[in-house]
Amino acid sequence: MADVKSIDIGDREISITLRISRDEYEVLRQTTTDILVLPTDHLDQTLTTGKLGNSNRLMLPKKLLGKYNVTELKKKVHARIFRVNEEIFLLVKLKESTTGIPKFGDAYE
């Protein structure tokens, strides 16, 4: 897992230097923007996993969704599985932010 080497706190932004493994570097695939940094030492939710035939389903408990005010789920969501240092992680984007994105359409809809 990545370790923080240094943190530089400025007036408007915070710069962090990380030490990562080769596996983590390969997960990045030369990406330099839209990188999400998450701690993995306090994963506090337990989900039951399983397979449903040929379907691609992700089942989430209502109680967990309610805790984060997720009132409805999109039918199709983006996800990716990462393998890093013999551990496997699933990252799912349940909702996309629409803040700052204008929506144009017919005013009479």
Image: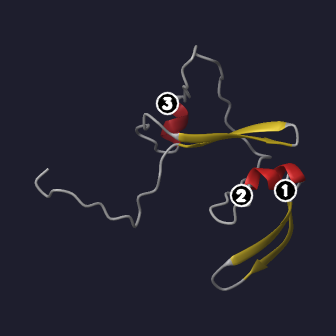
Nearest to N terminus: mark 2 or mark 1: 1
What residue do we see at 43% from left, 38% from top?
74
Residue depicted at x 62% and y 61%: 34
Q: Residue at coordinates 87% horizontally, 37% vertically from top-left? A: 86
Q: On the image, numbered disc 1 is attached to which residue?
A: 2
* Residue at x 63% of width, y 18% of height: 51
Q: In x, y percent, where is residue 29?
A: 74, 55
Q: Nearer the viewer, mark 3 or mark 2?
A: 2
Of tags 3 and 1, the one toward the viewer is 1
Residue at mark 3 to residue at mark 1: CA–CA distance: 32 Å
Determine the residue located farthest toward the bottom in the rendered image.
Answer: 11
Task: Provide residue 56's location: percent of width, then percent of height.
Answer: 55, 25
Residue holding disc 3: 62
Task: Locate residue 20: give its quadrant.
Answer: bottom right
Name the amino acid type tagged 3.
Lys
The amino acid beneath tag 1 is Ala
